[in-house]
Image: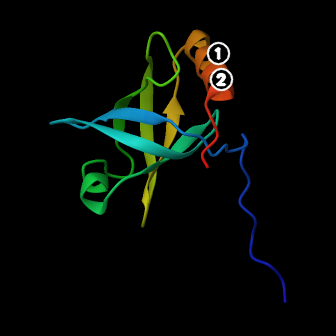
């Protein structure tokens, strides 16, 4: 019996403790990361919260933990699952990418 296709990722995922502020059209919500990578994040939320962030939509997002100044970029919602949403970073400048990479390295592991 053959295994199904394996998911291929460009960046390794890290299970960390981090909160992200995601902005919906009518509110800001703070969501806990399930895992983070240089390509995006899986964020824990309720189904009701996920409904505010449709797949394919783009939203401002900020990572405030561990940073003197929040790292702000745009998140593209790529998936909903039973435990939350997955987002991909849309980063317009190399400085933001570098700052995000440095901060991800410093985030504490989730236990």
Which residue is identified by label 2?
A: 101
- Note whether 62 is above or below 93 in the view shown: below
- Percent across and percent down for residue 3 are 80, 79
- Note whether 51 is above or below 23 in the view shown: below
- Percent across and percent down for residue 12 are 73, 43
Which residue is identified by label 1?
A: 98
Q: Which mark is residue 7?
A: none
Q: In the figure, is residue 54 to the left or right of 101?
A: left
Q: CA distance from mark 2 to mark 1?
A: 5 Å
Secondary structure of the residue carrying tag 1 is helix
Residue shown at 39%/47% (left/top)? 56
Residue shown at 66%/19% (left/top)? 102
* 80 or 58: nearer the viewer: 80
Q: In the figure, is residue 99 to the left or right of 59?
A: right
Secondary structure of the residue carrying tag 2 is helix
View extreme (left): residue:
26
The color scheme shown is: rainbow
Quadrant containing the N terminus is: bottom right
The 10 Å Cα crowd at callout 1, few under 14, some 14 to 19, many 20 or more, is few
Q: Quadrant of residue 94?
A: top right
- Percent across and percent down for residue 37 are 63, 38
- Image mark count: 2
Q: Are marks 2 and 1 in contact (CB under 8 Å)?
A: yes
Q: Quadrant of residue 47?
A: bottom left
- Note whether 27 is above or below 70 in the view shown: below
View extreme (right): residue:
1
Residue shown at 34%/43% (left/top)? 57
């Amino acid at each position: 019996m053959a295994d199904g296709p394996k998911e291929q990722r460009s960046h390794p995922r890290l299970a960390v403790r981090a909160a992200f502020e995601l902005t919906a059209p009518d509110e800001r919500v703070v969501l806990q990361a399930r895992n983070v990578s240089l390509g995006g994040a899986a964020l824990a939320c309720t189904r009701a919260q996920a409904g505010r962030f449709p797949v394919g939509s783009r939203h401002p997002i900020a990572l405030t933990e561990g940073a003197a100044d929040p790292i702000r970029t745009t998140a593209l919602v790529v998936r909903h699952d039973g435990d939350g949403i997955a987002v991909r970073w849309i980063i317009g400048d190399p400085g933001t990418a570098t700052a995000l990479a440095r901060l991800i390295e410093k985030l504490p592991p989730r236990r």
